[in-house]
Each structure stands twice: as structure tokens, then as C-alpha cells.
């Protein structure tokens, strides 16, 4: 069978997992450090392909910069080069060229940069010519399209002659990611004021700061799922902090209801099984990257689940809602939009004797969210290399934990 076959294993012996560093923190630290003149020492930078792409392109002097499939890299570099010294063309994979960037492009044009779309308007590839003079100090941005647009604008804000005031329109999605950006900017010497729907950053300079990137809470979520689905399990996840800048630390609270207890120690967190709730409702607006994992866990455990805040999943690496529906159906798990924005998950899950194949749709999170099903069902993950985008050592860690 083509792909990575994961035979059913119901018990997990105690292991320590040296998690990858946070991609979200790494990418922000790299941009902030570059804007500050590369004065800071950055440690434990992520080995994820997205972050390695960011490192490569920040050093590149070529006119055309190919971000591959790295959405964060595309968005952060678009803003970075809008306050740079040279014109660049940013492009990416076929899927990247289908992911909208119009909201960010419009904001950068309002500030004073020149943005030219080379194929379809509002989508990559795009040519960016840096601003010569700042046209506007205050701009309005839709709050629920992508927090990465907002973070990209915030990081360049102190470099602008007049600073920047961002007025966020409507519901604000992924708030913890915006807070992460502002908190990291503060560590590097830049202050900001966030009041209601208004964020203000005055003209300032980034300072040198020795930054150590935390392990990745998004990556940790898959190990929580393994523990939730195993009959018996105890794992220690290394490098995680109880006081984290990452919004996905909310997985601790979520999985406490789905059957996993967390105990923090100085070098990480120990996770082990506890009883789970029979039903679970959650708004994923602030943590959309956790939705696939939670859907799989609830489906396999027969937990009745209602999910909201999934709007941004449609413009990720794939249409994650469509992909989730299709793959969950293979296990008699039904995900249905019962009213606008409200998804209900009903499960008649039964383990089968044959190996069930999981399509991954060129999406790293589809591969990792479904991998924990091996604790209840033999599966085969197609195109397993997609995990290189965010967690390159995922399969190595799987083999370590499940080796005979």
C-alpha cells in the first residue's frame, strides 16, 4: 500500500518526545530580527520547511522569491519587503497562488507600497515595490480573514515614518497569534497599545534580544491525541512552558475534557489518560489549527461534538473542512454544518480489520491529525512527507514511541 502504514497499537509505553521548535515563534523572531538589523541571537529556531524557507529567502538577493507552500512566509515577507530597499516578486506553489492575499496587499498599498499582481488580482505571484513616503497612518483591516495579515503589518509598523494604527473590522480571529506578535515585539523593545478594535504602534527601533524559541504547541497537540485514543499511555513532551506565548497551549484545556491530564515540570509537560466527557462544544476562532485533531479524537471516542470558528480552514493548505468530511466518512464519522458556521460531529465509529487509507491533500495537519487513529485502527497515511512543512521529525518520533 502506498504511503506510511501504521499498524494498530493500543498501548504507549512512557517516552520523552523532543518536540520541534515553534514555527510561529521562529518566523516572527526571524522577521523582527531582520527588521532590527540582525542584532539578536536566536536559539532553537524551527527546522520546519516553512521556517527554513524564511531563513533562505531573508538572505536571498534574487528578485524572484519562491515561498513554496509557506503561507506565513508569503505574508510576512510581503510586508517586510514593503518597507525594504528593493523590489521583489513573491511567488509559490500552485496552491499558494490560490490563497488570497488581497487584504494584505490593499493595506500595504494604502500605506504607500506599490503592489502589482502578476496573474490573478488579489493572489500571488505579486511584485512589491517598497514605499518611498508613507501615505496613511491609520488603516482598517478585516479581523477574521487571517491573523497573519495583521501580524505582518504590526511587525513593520515601528519601521514606518509615522508608525501605524490598525483598526480591526468585525470579529477578530486567532487573537492569541496577534497577541504573540505584540508580545514578541515587546521583548525586542517595541511597545504598542491595543484598545478594543484599535492597535497603535508608534515609530520605534527594534533592540537586540537573546531569544530562545519554545517547543511547538501545535505539534504537541498530536501527542495529546495519541494519549486520548490509546488504552494506556503516558508521554513527556519536552521544551513546553506553562506560561507560553502560543495560543495553541489551549490544547491543555481542550484535551482535559477529552481524556488527557497535563502535569507541568521545569523541562516540559507529562500527559496521561483520564476519563473523558460525553459531549464537547468549542469555538476554534482562536486556535483553528487544532480543529482537525479534535474532530478526529471526538469521532474515534464517540464524543458528540459541536464546532464553530472554522471559517479560516477553507483557505489553508487545502479546504480543511471538505478534506475532514471526506476522510472522517471512511470511519462512519459525519461532520455536518447544521446551521451557518456551526458544525456537528456524529460518530458510529467501528474499527475494521483492513488498513484504511488516509488522503492528506498536501496538508501536513491532515497527516498528523489522523495518525493517532493507529491506536484504534490500522491506517495508511498517503504522502507522509507533507509533515516536513511544520514537524519534520514527526515520523521519526512516531517510530521511536511505537517501536517494538
Image (cartoon, helix red, strand yellow):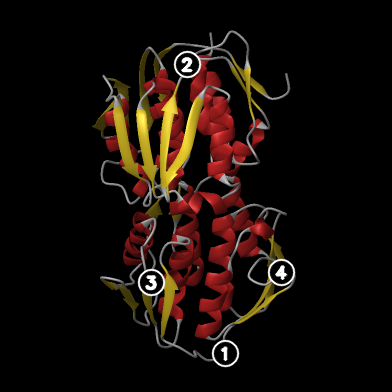
Left/right of residue 265 with respect to residue 18 in the rendered view? left
In this figure, which residue is indicated by the disc labeled 2? 375
Select label 1 or label 3 by which is in front.
3
Marks 4 and 1 in Cβ contact (< 8 Å): no
Judging depth in this view, the residue of 346 and 104 nearest the camera is 346
Residue located 53% across and 26% down the image: 371
C-alpha distance separating marks 2 and 4: 44 Å
Which label sits on residue 169? 3
Select label 1 or label 2 by which is in front.
2
C-alpha distance separating marks 1 and 3: 27 Å
- Say whether disc 1 or disc 3 marks the residue closer to the N-terminus: 1
Q: Position of residue 205 (x, y in %)?
A: 39, 77
Say which quarter of the image contains residue 360. top right
Name above or below for residue 262 compared with residue 64.
Answer: above
- Say whether disc 3 or disc 2 marks the residue closer to the N-terminus: 3
In this figure, which residue is indicated by the disc labeled 4? 120
In this figure, which residue is indicated by the disc labeled 1? 132
Judging depth in this view, the residue of 319 and 400 nearest the camera is 319
- Say whether disc 2 or disc 4 marks the residue closer to the N-terminus: 4
Residue located 44% across and 62% down the image: 40
| Element assignment for label 4 | loop
Left/right of residue 183 with respect to residue 92 in the rendered view? left
Q: Position of residue 295 (x, y in %)?
A: 44, 33
Amino acid at each position: 500500500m502506498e504511503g506510511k502504514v501504521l499498524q494498530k497499537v493500543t498501548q504507549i509505553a512512557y517516552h520523552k518526545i523532543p518536540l520541534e521548535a515553534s514555527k510561529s515563534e521562529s518566523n516572527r523572531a526571524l522577521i523582527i530580527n531582520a527588521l532590527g538589523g540582525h542584532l539578536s541571537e536566536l536559539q532553537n529556531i524551527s527546522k520546519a520547511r516553512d521556517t527554513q524557507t524564511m531563513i533562505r529567502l531573508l538572505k536571498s538577493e534574487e528578485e524572484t522569491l519562491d515561498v513554496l507552500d509557506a503561507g506565513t512566509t508569503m505574508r510576512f515577507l510581503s510586508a517586510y519587503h514593503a518597507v525594504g530597499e528593493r523590489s521583489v516578486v513573491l511567488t509559490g506553489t500552485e496552491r499558494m497562488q490560490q490563497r488570497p492575499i488581497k487584504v494584505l496587499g490593499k493595506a500595504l498599498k494604502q500605506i504607500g507600497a506599490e503592489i502589482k499582481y502578476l496573474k490573478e488580482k488579489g493572489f500571488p505571484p505579486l511584485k512589491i515595490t517598497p514605499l518611498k513616503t508613507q501615505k496613511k497612518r491609520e488603516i482598517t483591516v478585516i479581523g477574521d480573514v487571517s491573523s497573519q495579515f495583521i501580524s505582518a503589518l504590526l511587525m513593520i509598523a515601528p519601521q514606518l515614518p509615522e508608525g501605524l494604527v490598525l483598526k480591526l473590522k468585525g470579529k477578530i480571529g486567532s487573537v492569541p497569534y496577534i497577541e504573540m506578535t505584540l508580545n514578541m515585539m515587546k521583548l525586542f523593545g517595541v511597545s504598542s497599545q491595543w484598545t478594543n478594535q484599535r492597535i497603535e504602534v508608534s515609530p520605534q527601533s527594534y533592540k537586540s534580544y537573546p531569544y530562545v524559541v519554545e517547543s511547538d504547541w501545535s505539534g504537541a497537540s498530536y501527542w495529546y491525541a495519541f494519549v486520548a485514543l490509546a488504552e494506556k499511555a503516558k508521554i513527556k513532551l519536552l521544551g513546553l512552558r506553562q506560561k507560553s506565548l502560543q495560543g495553541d497551549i489551549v490544547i491543555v484545556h481542550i484535551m482535559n475534557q477529552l481524556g488527557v491530564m497535563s502535569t507541568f515540570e521545569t523541562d516540559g509537560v507529562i500527559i496521561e489518560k483520564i476519563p473523558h466527557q460525553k459531549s464537547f462544544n468549542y469555538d476554534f476562532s482562536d486556535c483553528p489549527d487544532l480543529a482537525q485533531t479534535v474532530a478526529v479524537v471526538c469521532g474515534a471516542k464517540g464524543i458528540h461534538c459541536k464546532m464553530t470558528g472554522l471559517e479560516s480552514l477553507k483557505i489553508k493548505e487545502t479546504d480543511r473542512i471538505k478534506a475532514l468530511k471526506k476522510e472522517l466518512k471512511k470511519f462512519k464519522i459525519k461532520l455536518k454544518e447544521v446551521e451557518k458556521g456551526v458544525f456537528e460531529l456524529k460518530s458510529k465509529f467501528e474499527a475494521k480489520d483492513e488498513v484504511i487509507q488516509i488522503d492528506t491533500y498536501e496538508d501536513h495537519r491532515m497527516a498528523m491529525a489522523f495518525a493517532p487513529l493507529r491506536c484504534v485502527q490500522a491506517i495508511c497515511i498517503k504522502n507522509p512527507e507533507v509533515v516536513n512543512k511544520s514537524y519534520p521529525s514527526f515520523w521519526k518520533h512516531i517510530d521511536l514511541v511505537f517501536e517494538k
